[in-house]
Amino acid sequence: METRIIQLESIAAMQDQTILNLNEEIYRQQQDISRLSQRLEAVEERLRELQNGEDIAGNERPPHW
């Protein structure tokens, strides 16, 4: 009986460590997702600007026209 309890405690401890590891990985992935979302928003904003004709060098008429 004591051996069985020790085994169960061992399993519980390993599961606790696995859960901690998974939580750390989820946290890192969420940070990556947040960072990538911000970069995507910046790219989308830049694309909207380009589609609206803003900041496009070479397509502007010189002032003397």
Image (spheres, rainbow, N blue to C red):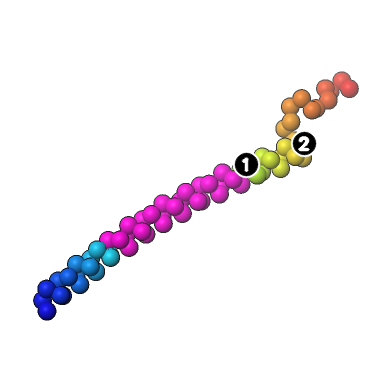
Identified by mark 2, the residue type is: Gly
Magenta stretch: residue 12 in it? no
Assign the magenta stretch its main secondary structure. Answer: helix
Seen as rendered, the residue at the extreme top is: 64
Task: Tell me where residue 42 sits by quadrant.
Answer: top right
What residue is drawn where x is 15% and y is 75%?
Answer: 4
Q: What is the x, y in percent for residue 22?
A: 36, 59
Report which residue position mark 2 lands on: 53
| Left or right side of 1 for 59 | right
Q: Few, some or many C-alpha atoms within 10 Å of disc 2 (few <14, some 14-19, many ≥20)?
A: few
What residue is drawn where x is 37% and y is 59%?
Answer: 23
| Left or right side of 41 for 16 | left
Instruction: For marks 2 and 1, give the CA distance.
Output: 15 Å
Q: Say whether marks 2 and 1 touch (CB < 8 Å).
A: no
Identified by mark 1, the residue type is: Val
Which span is picked out in magenta?
17-41
Task: Tell me where residue 48 sits by quadrant.
Answer: top right
Q: What is the x, y in percent for residue 30?
A: 46, 54
Q: What is the x, y in percent for residue 50?
A: 72, 37
Q: How many marks?
A: 2
Q: In the rendered view, would you say 41 is above or below 5?
A: above
Q: What is the x, y in percent for residue 62?
A: 83, 22
Seen as rendered, the residue at the extreme right is: 65
Report which residue position mark 1 lands on: 43
